[in-house]
Amino acid sequence: VSRIPLRFWKSIYLFLYVFSLGMLFLIIPFGTEVNGAKRWIYIGPVSVQPAEISKFAVIILTAVWLSRIPQKTLQTRKAILTVLAPSLLEAGIIYWITRNLSSAIIVMVIAVGMLFVTAEDYRRHFLWAAVIVAAAVGVVLWVMKSGGSGATFRLHRIQVWLDPSAYADGTGYQVLQGLYGIGSGGIFGKGLGQSMQKLGYIPEAQNDMIFSIICEELGLFGALSIITLFIILCWRMMVVATHANDLFGSLITVGVMIHIAVQVILNIAVVTNSIPNTGVTLPFFSYGGSAIMILLAEIGLVLNVARNSRQGDAA
């Protein structure tokens, strides 16, 4: 991906977006249910999670549209809605088909974040962002109040978040075991590979809860080191975006940075029980197929932008 000219992505952005939507709809007849969630399509021995492709497609499409809309036009409500409409549609379909609220939120945050850094009038967009967030919270609360299995499920997650010990024998088990792993690691941890929690105590420890294993084996020092690495990665991507040759390359880099930063924040917040439990992987650490391939492709895009940046300053 780092060797493919950026103009190639400009030429296929609509095809890529439609392809991502098509993959989501293919889940309905061909999707495979795993652990109660129908979010994967198996192509022979290979599983594909279409929601991950959607994140990549939204970054490319939003970057193309924002790079083509003049700044003065971008200040209008019509332009803002035009930019956000494709990501809103993608997020809505993700949630409707897969009930994967976390991926839907990430898709919308990516688009809103890219729009925010592009616009000149930050105060107005702060207000817009506040309105959008307030509306989203209102919709969620209304859905929960109106009842239904999905609403009951998410309301229960909030109850578990507020008091996981009350559900220690059920849905609060994973959260508590993750916290035990974090607490038992101490300053420098038990040593690499010496975790006890991953030996059957934390379900699927290699996926969403891997940060608790890092804390247990490497301690506070290891956890802070991982967080520092992510901060450095995001900072370098900010440098690449600043030195990009054109707005399109800069926006792609910003979109990738937002994607990684949001997933890191959400994953660590879930593992430490700072927010209700939701299925978000820790980039480059959690086990995964589609997720890691898409992340590597996004890093390839950033390396591409860096290689062609002004005077090679960002490389």
Image (cartoon, rainbow, N blue to C red):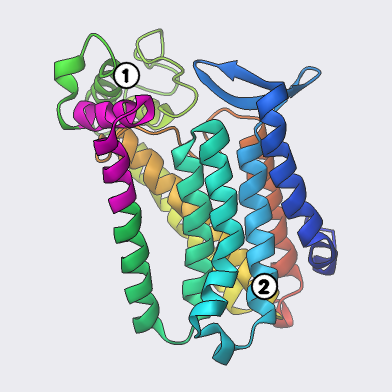
Magenta stretch, main secondary structure class:
helix
Picture layout, residue 272 above or below residue 41: below
**Pointer 1 local density, CA inside 10 Å: few below 14, some 14–19, many at least 20:** many
Q: Residue at x 23, y 8 (%)?
A: 169
Q: Secondary structure at mark 2?
A: helix
Locate residue 242: give its quadrant: bottom right
Q: Nearer the viewer, residue 84 or 309?
A: 84
- Can see residue 35? yes
Specify few, some or many for label 2: CA neighbours under 10 Å numbering under 14, 14-19, or 20 or more.
Answer: some
**Quarter-wise, where is residue 22 in the image?**
top right
Amino acid type, mark 1: Gln
User: Going from the N terminus, do you reach mark 1 or mark 2 first?
Assistant: 2
- Is 147 included in the stretch rendered in magenta? yes
The kind of secondary structure element at disc 1 is helix
Q: Which residue is mark 1?
A: 174
Quick check: 42 left or right of 87? right
Q: Amino acid at mark 2?
A: Trp
The tag on residue 106 is none
Quadrant of the drawing holding the C terminus: bottom right
Q: What residue is shown at x 20% (from left), y 13% (from top)?
A: 168
Q: What is the x, y in percent for residue 232?
A: 47, 59
Q: Quadrant of residue 314?
A: bottom right
Q: Which residues are magenta?
A: 138-161
Residues at marks 1 and 2 touching, judged by CB atoms closer than 8 Å: no
Percent across and percent down for residue 206 are 49, 23
Where 112 sits versus 286, above or below?
below
Query: In the rendering, at what x and y percent does residue 9 appear?
Result: 80, 62
Could you tell me if residue 221 is visible in this image?
no
Identify the residue at image location x=33%, y=58%: 135
Q: Nearer the viewer, mark 1 or mark 2?
A: 2
Q: Is residue 244 left or right of residue 124?
A: right
Which residue bears the numbered disc 2? 65
